[in-house]
Image (cartoon, rainbow, N blue to C red):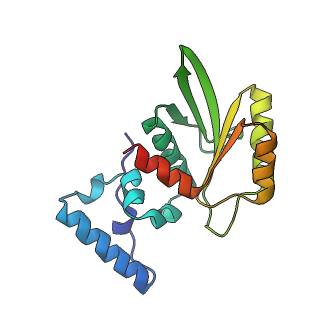
Amino acid sequence: QYIRPIVLFQAQPNTSSDSETFEKVKQMLMEYDIPEPLLSVYDQILIDPNSVYNLESWEFEELVAEVYSRNGYRARVTQRTRDGGRDVIATCEVGGVSYSTYFECKQQGPRRPVGVEIVRGLYGVMERDRIDKGVIVTTSRFTRDAVKEAEMLNGRIKLVDYQELQRLMRRAE
């Protein structure tokens, strides 16, 4: 399983509020005897949800794959460049039939919503590859036009904002 040292121990805090968070989390980890280099990104985000914004885009893709793996999918991250318009490919089996789902992962600031062009792009890749389901996962939210576009596709593309992703993470603990 993917494990990396916690970001909080890799960098110095930028502001006084970051410094307080850094010290609180560090103290809490020490109290639980959690060794610093063994804390997974998944656990780090559960402890400090804002730390998701410190991840590299490929780390966010790994996180999404892990979340869905813990929720019953067989998920794998695609190659980092030239991924063919999908970041994670996941399969699940229902009644002996295997279904594939393409995931597009958008890690961006909370004030930068994902627009309709991302929905259309994933839909185009799904049509090209004849895939029935797609999921767009973001650390932000979606524009109204993106939500409308996804609704017009009759459930073929699910939009997962950061609040929903956090719910999925807690559910799979």
Residue 82 % position (x, y): 69, 41
For the point 48% across and 51% down, which residue is it? 167
Which image quadrant for residue 57?
Answer: bottom right
Q: Is residue 58 above or below residue 154?
A: below
For residue 165, above or below residue 17: above
Q: Residue drawn 75% across and 60% down?
A: 143
Where, quadrant-wise, is the N terminus in this rendering? top left
Q: Is residue 136 left or right of residue 41?
A: right
Q: Tell me where residue 88 sits by quadrant.
A: top right
In depth, the one of 76 and 138 nearer the eye is: 138
Q: Nearer the viewer, residue 61 or 120?
A: 120
Rendering quarter of residue 121: top right
The image shows residue 158, relative to residue 10, as above or below, that is above
* Relative depth, front residue between 78 and 132: 132
Residue situated in front as seen by the camera: 161 or 104: 161
Relative to 32, is 131 on the left or the right? right
Quick check: 75 left or right of 20? right
- Residue 30 spot, x, y in % from top left: 20, 65
| Farthest-out residue, bottom | 16
Residue at image location 49% in from the left, 61% down from the top? 52
Give the residue at x 53% y 21%.
93
